Image: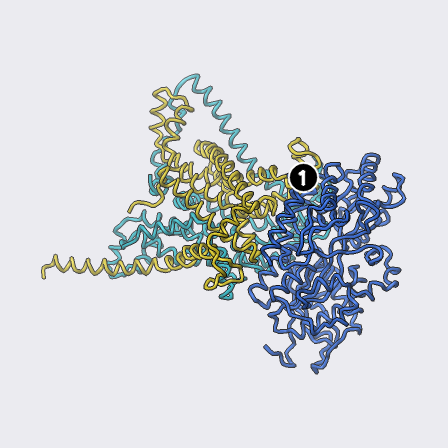
């Protein structure tokens, strides 16, 4: 299907801003994106050779979403403006309605069926390899040469690369942080956040006992992909690894130590048994309500803490009571890491609007739009030039950008494998079984090892 | 031709046209049933013998695998767990439902003021969508703010830091409770219908013979209820064995049933998860059929009416 | 005992019912005492049934009316009663285009399935119950056997076929699969009702020159209206409640019926929006509950007639 000049291509864009809880962030994502559009600034490498020069008013964003209230709250009514006058797209917004796991299921079914319901996908960092290896994503290798890649975080570029081909462009970062109650720690005589997991446990117990706080450390340990990432994270912060997608090293002493630390959060009474069923909202809510000392959560937590009104009416703590730090480690000799990643922009291989899609991707990942994205929703840019822009860090002292630079902590993306979903299913189930007390950390490590080895051996 | 012969000829042609009409009337049903139920079951078996994925086609289902998908299935610990949980669920939930359903039926069989109202009330859980009941159960058991979770903590059924959803045994119990809530009405209705066919004279005669109500229940009512009991047992057992909604929504991934195992593999669709899922689908089908046969042949449940 | 046994259960009961029940026969002091005890059991049982049906629903109703602040705090005994009432969750969902869309999807799927099922199942039930032809019993048994099929037994090949035909993510995929799995129930109910009609009805019509089809349409169907209503209601309810096929074949949230949408109904950023979820659950269930309460007799007679096919 070739478009003629007077046809405005309709781009169907899947979008979400939050790695885990897609819908929850949908509203602010759209708000941010409409802000991007309104900004109408330069910096985009527009290829306006098409001739048509339509005004802003002619660019419409159709939506099937249920997040219209979020828009109207931000003063925006339909249609939403995504592009400036130089960009000639009518963007139909296709809304997904659940967490990343559901989003993944739906988008994968759709791509497998070969539909072109969506042209551009804003999706999880782990999808580039999973979908690209299946041939479901447009190959961007020629459009996005190494020289253009240089400004992006190498790990994020890696996440889009499979067999030497590039299937996406990094959109924004989403990392894991330790949020803590500054006031409670100070009252207990601690002047700094914990550096190690054992310090965190010690501080938790003291604060819980002395100040009658219900919970120590809240995290999302449920049997879902978020649980996979957290399990890997405990292993990584203990200096171990589980898999790089090809070899499996889950039974190393350091890996087992990491899992032991995760389990000990429950056995030592620092986290409630119920964390085994917690996804992010369950973990976050008690912290916001003032009932927990520590919280491990994603970037959006900055926003939730800074704007407690936006988080519903359960908030009982003031932003000034909260501090944020890199995640603790098993020992201070290990440098701070977290396991996360963020989102990339992908183009459906079956989309008839390849060129228009590419233009949209370029626009959204331009330095100016990355700055805009950060200013609007505080998600870290994937471009090093924007990330290292000292101005942003100074302007937003309580934001992820202050911690996300490589010299402060490193964000590790999930294992790269066409079978990451299968791997994650195994890991999530095993980590979760451990949190439920059904098996020891050692058994868990061995089950993960054999489960992943089976996948690796079958998939080559 | 005699009038008798004419009449006979007319009857014959009428019955022939009637036969044609009859076939025309059942044809759409037969076609759709063959195309969307019987054929797909055979296709599932066909797929289960191949290294297929959700991207395969039926004409090109991937390399021939023999029974390898089945050996992979039976060595998969996740499948073993799904089988275990499904079996426990079926064996525990169905008898409980039967006993409670019997109690409800006996009560509703009595004459009392408001009986019609009660019969309507009892139907409510039956009409409740199972997936929605599961959502609501999750919502109320949710930690830390779920109201049912709180009540269970207060009465000491679960520890104060725990949640029904974070412990597999508690979760299975929770799933069974929701299933009982939604399934008792069906059984109660069937048994009630059965009870109503028992002539009161029979019970009265038993009473005259000096039988206590308990005796007459076990010696008169129960034997006469056997057909209704077996029919409801058959259908509840098969429904429980194929349970999907409750496990998928309420237990999410934490405990699996046979059906959620199949679903996950099919929807995941890759070469690692799709083939064992087709094998598991065949397994679920075969075991369901076996259960039905045991009831029909073994216990003599009569399902097809004699012509 | 055969199907006929279930079918006639409700009707027959009237003939056999003694005025006054079994307790009447035994005279004297002991009987009175026993009746008292029995009454206690009876009313105790009635109370337990009533509470176990209604209490969970009241809790959900309470959640749907609570302000979010009350839902996002630790519960307390006092939270068993609402703190203050708000209808904000209901306004939230009724302003939510996706929720409204899912109501529409459910209506389309359940409505279309009901119509298709009656249109093809009605004639089949008639032929199977009142006409003589070869393989009648075989066909009857084959249709009945579907109610033994686990639904997951067909999802893998159906997924592939729908994909090849471009029917994935279409209402058609869900309607056709739903239809096959409710057909046995519908046919059984209808056949049971058709069978009750006097055998000479069509003969009379045919004497007047009507064909078999005409006799079916003009004589049998009107006379079996209660059975048709029963079949329609049961088909509608079971399709409205269907989850597996919709969850498998529909991947576009705007096409999801209520059973698929509501488990994914998480809106607020802080916590899953319990209030809206509860409100949505009640809203989508109320039509079903109304059907159940209004058509109780029809449902019961349908269920007991169709008991054999569950």
Image height of C172 relative to B122, above or below: below
Placement of the N terminus of chain B among the 4 image quadrants: bottom left
Q: Note whether residue C150 is visible.
A: yes
Q: Secondary structure at mark 1?
A: loop
> Label 1, on which residue?
A440
For label 1, the crowd category at 10 Å Cα-Cα, with few meaning under 14, some 14 to 19 and many 20 or more, is some
**Which chain corresponds to the colour blue?**
A
Chain B, hue in figure? yellow
Tell me the quarter of the picture where residue B16 sits: bottom left
**Where residue C229 sits in the image (x, y, percent)?**
42, 51
Left or right position of C237 against A215: left
Single out the residue that lies furthest toward the top: C29
In this view, the residue in front, C238 or B199, is: C238
Chain of the residue on which disc 1 is drawn: A
Q: Within the image, what quadrant is residue A457 found in? A: bottom right
Q: Nearer the viewer, residue C128 or C38?
A: C128
- Which residue: 79% across, 59% down? A378
How many numbered tags mark residues here?
A: 1
Residue drawn at x 45%, y 48% as measured from the top left: B285
Residue C118 seen in the current view: no
Measured as percent of width and height from the top left, residue C274 is found at: 66, 47
Does residue B217 lie above or below B50 as drawn? Answer: above
- The residue closer to the viewer here, A445 or B159, is A445
- The chain coloured cyan in the image: C
């Amino acid at each position: 299907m070739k478009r003629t000049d007077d046809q405005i291509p309709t781009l169907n864009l899947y979008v979400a801003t939050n790695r885990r809880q897609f819908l929850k962030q949908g509203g602010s994502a759209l708000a941010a994106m409409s802000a991007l559009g309104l900004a109408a600034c330069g910096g985009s490498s527009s290829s306006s050779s098409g001739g048509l020069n339509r005004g802003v008013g002619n660019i419409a964003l159709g939506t099937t979403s249920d997040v219209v209230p979020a828009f109207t709250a931000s003063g925006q009514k339909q249609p939403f403006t995504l592009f400036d006058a130089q960009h000639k797209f009518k963007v139909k917004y296709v809304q997904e309605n659940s967490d990343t796991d559901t989003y993944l299921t739906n988008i994968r079914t759709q791509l497998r069926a070969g539909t072109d319901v969506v042209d551009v996908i804003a999706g999880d960092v782990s999808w580039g390899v999973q979908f690209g290896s299946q041939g479901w994503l447009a190959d961007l290798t020629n459009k996005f040469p190494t020289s253009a890649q240089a400004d992006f975080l190498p790990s994020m570029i890696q996440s889009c690369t499979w067999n030497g081909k590039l299937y996406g462009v990094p959109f924004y970062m989403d990392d894991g942080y330790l949020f803590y109650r500054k006031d409670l720690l100070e009252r207990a005589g601690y002047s700094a956040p914990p550096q190690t997991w054992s310090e965190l446990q010690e501080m938790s117990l003291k604060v819980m006992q002395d100040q009658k706080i219900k919970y120590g450390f809240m995290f999302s340990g449920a049997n879902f992909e978020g649980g996979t990432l957290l399990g890997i994270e405990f292993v990584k912060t203990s200096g171990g690894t589980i898999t790089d997608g090809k070899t499996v090293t889950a039974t190393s002493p350091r890996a087992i130590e990491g899992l032991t630390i995760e389990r000990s959060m429950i056995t030592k009474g620092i986290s409630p048994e119920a964390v085994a069923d917690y996804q992010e909202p369950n973990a976050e809510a008690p912290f916001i309500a003032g009932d927990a000392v520590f919280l491990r959560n994603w970037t959006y937590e900055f926003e939730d803490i800074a704007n407690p009104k936006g988080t519903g009416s359960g908030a009982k703590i003031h932003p000034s009571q909260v501090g944020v730090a890199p995640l603790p480690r098993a020992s201070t000799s290990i440098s701070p890491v977290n396991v996360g990643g963020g989102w990339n922009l992908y183009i459906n291989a079956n989309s008839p609007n390849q060129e228009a899609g590419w233009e949209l991707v370029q626009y959204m990942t331009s330095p100016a739009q990355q700055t805009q994205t950060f200013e609007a929703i505080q998600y870290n840019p994937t471009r090093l030039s924007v990330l290292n822009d000292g101005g942003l860090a100074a302007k937003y002292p309580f934001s992820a950008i202050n911690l996300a630079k490589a010299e402060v902590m490193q964000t590790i993306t999930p294992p790269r494998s066409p079978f990451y979903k299968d791997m994650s299913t195994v890991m999530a189930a095993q980590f979760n079984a451990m949190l439920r007390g059904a098996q020891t950390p050692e058994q868990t490590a061995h089950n993960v090892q054999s489960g992943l080895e089976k996948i690796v051996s079958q998939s080559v | 031709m005699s009038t008798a012969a004419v009449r006979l000829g007319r009857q014959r042609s009428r019955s022939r046209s009637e036969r044609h009409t009859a076939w025309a009337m059942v044809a759409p049903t037969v076609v759709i049933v063959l195309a969307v139920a019987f054929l797909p079951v055979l296709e599932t078996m066909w797929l289960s013998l191949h290294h297929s994925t959700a991207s395969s086609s039926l004409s090109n289902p991937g390399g021939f695998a023999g029974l390898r998908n089945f050996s992979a299935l039976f060595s998969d610990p996740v499948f073993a767990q799904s089988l275990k949980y499904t079996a426990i669920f079926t064996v525990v939930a169905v008898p409980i439902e039967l006993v409670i359903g019997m109690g409800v039926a006996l009560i509703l069989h009595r004459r009392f003021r408001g009986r019609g109202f009660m019969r309507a009330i009892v139907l409510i859980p039956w009409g409740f969508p199972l997936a929605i009941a599961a959502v609501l159960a999750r919502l109320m058991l949710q930690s830390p703010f779920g109201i049912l979770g709180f009540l269970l903590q207060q009465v000491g059924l679960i520890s104060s830091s725990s949640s029904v959803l974070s412990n597999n045994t508690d979760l299975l119990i929770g799933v069974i409770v929701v299933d009982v809530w939604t399934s008792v009405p069906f059984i109660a209705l069937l048994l009630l219908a059965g009870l109503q066919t028992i002539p009161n004279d029979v019970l009265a005669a038993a009473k005259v013979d000096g039988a206590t109500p308990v005796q007459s229940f076990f010696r008169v009512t129960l034997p006469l209820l056997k057909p209704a009991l077996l029919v409801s047992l058959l259908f509840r057992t098969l429904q429980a064995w194929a349970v999907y909604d409750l496990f998928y929504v309420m237990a999410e991934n934490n405990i699996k049933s046979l059906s959620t195992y199949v679903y996950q593999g099919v929807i995941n669709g890759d070469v690692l998860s799709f083939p064992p899922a087709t094998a598991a689908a065949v397994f679920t089908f075969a075991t369901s059929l076996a259960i039905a046969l045991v009831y029909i042949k073994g216990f003599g449940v009569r399902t097809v009416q004699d012509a | 005992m055969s199907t006929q046994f279930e079918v006639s259960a409700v009707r027959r009961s009237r003939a056999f019912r003694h005025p006054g029940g079994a307790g009447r026969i035994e005279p004297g002091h002991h009987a009175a005492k026993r009746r008292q005890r029995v009454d206690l059991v009876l009313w105790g049982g009635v109370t337990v049934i009533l509470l176990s049906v209604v209490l969970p629903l009241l809790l959900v109703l309470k959640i749907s009316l609570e302000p979010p602040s009350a839902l996002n705090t630790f519960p307390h005994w006092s939270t068993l009663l609402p703190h203050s009432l708000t209808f904000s969750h209901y306004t939230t969902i009724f302003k939510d285009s996706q929720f409204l869309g899912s109501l529409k999807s459910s209506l389309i799927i359940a409505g279309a399935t009901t119509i298709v099922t009656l249109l093809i199942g009605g004639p089949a039930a008639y032929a199977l119950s009142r006409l003589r032809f070869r393989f009648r019993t075989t066909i009857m048994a084959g249709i009945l056997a579907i109610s033994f099929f686990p639904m997951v037994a067909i999802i893998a090949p159906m997924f592939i076929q729908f994909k090849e035909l471009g029917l994935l993510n279409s209402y058609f995929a869900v309607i056709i699969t739903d239809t096959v799995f409710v057909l046995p129930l519908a046919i059984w109910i209808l056949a049971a009702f058709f069978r009750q009609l006097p055998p000479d009805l069509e003969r009379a019509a045919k004497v007047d020159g009507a064909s078999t089809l005409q006799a079916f349409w003009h004589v049998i169907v009107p006379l079996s209206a209660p059975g048709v209503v029963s079949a329609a209601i049961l088909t509608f309810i079971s399709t409205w409640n269907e989850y597996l096929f919709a969850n498998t074949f529909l991947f576009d949230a705007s096409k999801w019926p209520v059973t698929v949408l509501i488990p994914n109904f998480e809106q607020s950023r802080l916590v899953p929006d319990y209030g809206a979820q509860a409100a949505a659950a009640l809203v989508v269930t109320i039509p079903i509950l109304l059907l159940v309460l209004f058509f109780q007799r029809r449902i019961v007679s349908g269920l007991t007639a169709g008991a054999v096919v569950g």
